Every structure is written in C-alpha cells, then in structure tokens.
Amino acid sequence: MSSNIHLIFGDEYLVSSKARKLIESLVPPEDRAFGLEIVDGASDNVDSAIKAVDCCREAIQTVGFMGSSKVVWFRDVNFLQDNITGRSQLVKERVEVLAGLIKAGLPQGQILVVTSPKVDKRYALYKACKEAGDVQEFAVSDKAYISEKQAEQMALEFFRNAGLKVNEQVIDLFLAKVGTDTRQILNEVEKLSVYMGARKDVTVNDVKEIVSSAREALAWDLADAFGKRDLKLAISVSRQLLFQKENAIGLIIALESRVKELMIYREAIDNGWLIAGRGWGSVPPEVEEIFSQDFKKDPRSVHPFRMGILAEQAKQFSPRELQKCRQVVLDAHEKLVSSGVPEEIVIEPLLVRMLS
C-alpha cells in the first residue's frame, strides 16, 4: 500500500493528535517552511469548499522547493459527508477531480494528508484514499451508550496520565458535566490537575467547584434544577442558556425527557421495582418488554450514581405532579413550534407552572 496518501477522520482531538505526529515524522522542523503546505478545508458554504479543493489540488500538483519532497495537509475538511455543502453537485464534482488525481498517483515526492471530522464512505475521496493509501478512522458513535463508554475510557486514561485518582461517582459527575468530546475532556482534566496541586484524590466537590459544563451538558443542568425542584436555579440556568443562543426547543425536549425519566422512576419506586441503595430488582414481563423494545437506552443501564440522583429527584414529585408537568411541557413545546412567541416568554412561565 502506498504511503503518500493518508486520510484520517473521526474524533477531532484524536485526529489532530495523529495527524501532527504523522506530519512530524514526515517533515523535519527545519524543512517545514518549504516542505509543508497546509490547506484549510473548514468551509461554511459551497464557494469556500470549492476554493479549498482547488487550493489542495494546486498544492499537490506544485513540486516542492528545488524539487524536494513536499507534504500537503488538507486540514479539517468538513464537506466530505452528507451535509448541505457536501451534497452540492459543484462540490462533489471538484472532490471527484481530486479523487481522480489520487487514483492516478501523486507526483513524485508529494504526500497528501487529509483530516476530517466525518467522511461518508460512499464518497469518491474516501474510495480513492482507501484504494491508494492509508485510511485511519477514529469513530465517534451515534449511539449514546457507546460514545459514553468511549468517553469514560478516555477520561480515565487522561486522569491516569495526570496522576489523579477518581472513583465511580467522580467520573460519572465529571462526564455528566463535560460530555463526550475528547478535547473538552482533556481540557477539564488538565484544569483539575492544576486546581488540585499536590492532592491526587479528586472528589465530587472538586468537580463541582472547577469543572465547566459543556454546552450540550448545560441542558442537563436545567433538567437537574427542575428535578431538584429549585425554581430559582432553573430560571437562572434557562436565562444563561437562552443568552448563549441555545435552542429553546432543545431545552424543552431535555425537560420532556427528564419528566419521562422521573415518571418511570416514580412508578418503579412505588411498585418496589427500584429500591434506594439497592438498585433495580425484577419487573413484570410487560414492563421488561417496554424497557427492552421501546427505549433507546434501558433505564436500568444508567450508572448507579446517576440512578441514585434520578431516584431522589423522582421522590420530589407525586405521580399526579409529574403528569401535570408532562402536560404543561407538551403544551409549551406546541406553543413554541406553532405560535412564534419569544422563547423567554415560554420557558420561564413553563418552569413556574412545573415547579410552583
């Protein structure tokens, strides 16, 4: 297999780390002024994508300084997938021309490195790189339970490398705040390491004190504030999220999901299927079938620490109150979608009705 074509895609942090190590091995520091050409592939429209492909094609067809070898790094290409820009016929045609050059073979001494957050394996460039060179994928799973497990393994590795010790409660809270993005995980571990100083055993309070919530995790903060029946905190978090231009529909969906979870936990507690401190026991066959077939993620597969939090939150509401919450959040969802009412006029009254 030829070693002058490299396609690396998937998790942003892992892709970037792998690409930089590869570049370092291919081009010594003293040769990078003339031996390395970087073409930015991050494009937000069709015109910029076409320009990026043309620049890449021109770079690999231009010999290195004084005829020496050259590495072209086509970096962060975000239109090799089934998105608006990637589906453009004009972009596809330009990419197919580039794929044709790869299939025909690059000029002597030229090396092409392509990095991307996601690549559709049906697209011409992927097929050309697969046939002519080396392809490495650092897959990011669309399935939550897989991506969460991968994030946990990565976080544990970063904590070990930093010389920090964590228990199950700490790692669960950490990931609940940080999310599954690898670079965000690394940044927060490094921040914790500085904060800890000489201490090595990370506590739940340390995580609460210093770890920042990722944007996608902030919706969980709103749902948790609701679950704690803390109206003041819920309104404060919702205002912060709307100020950050978070989608109000997304926040309502997060609240819908939390209400659904708490209804399940409330019923499980009332029927003795879930016992505090002991976890889930046996459930009736019809409930077993619902958990197995009607849920993307079985409620019983939640981490014990998170399970304990949800169980405590469920105890804060009666079944009747949760039914009421479910109805008002569904009404709010419909109102936002159909009426065009300002988001803050819907979200805050919703929280008041749910928690008053």
Image: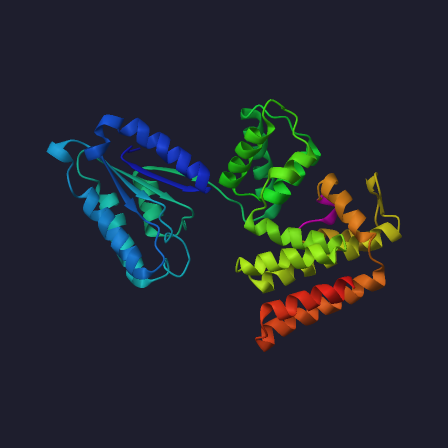
Dividing the picture into quadrants, the one containing residue 201 is top right
Q: In which quarter of the image is the N terminus?
A: top left
Front-lying residue, 98 or 163: 163
The residue located at (34%, 31%) in the rendering is 22
Q: Is residue 246 visible?
A: no
Q: Where is residue 204 in the image (x, y as percent from the top left)?
A: 69, 35
Give percent across and percent down for residue 214.
Answer: 56, 47
Q: State left or right for residue 212 relative to residue 348.
A: left
Horizontal side of 191 relative to 323 (left or right) equals left
183 is within the stretch colored magenta: no
User: Is 299 contained in the magenta span?
Assistant: yes
* Quarter of image, res 44: bottom left
Q: Which residue is drawn at 55% across and 62% down?
A: 247
Residue occupying image coordinates x 34% and y 62%: 88
Q: Is residue 157 above or below residue 251?
A: above
Name the one closer to the observer, 33 or 80: 33
Whether 27 is drawn above or below 49: the answer is above
Q: Quadrant of the C terminus?
A: bottom right
Which range of residues does the magenta coloring cover? Answer: 297-301
Vertical order, 39 against 155 (above or below): below
Question: Which is more toward the observer, 273 or 340?
Answer: 340
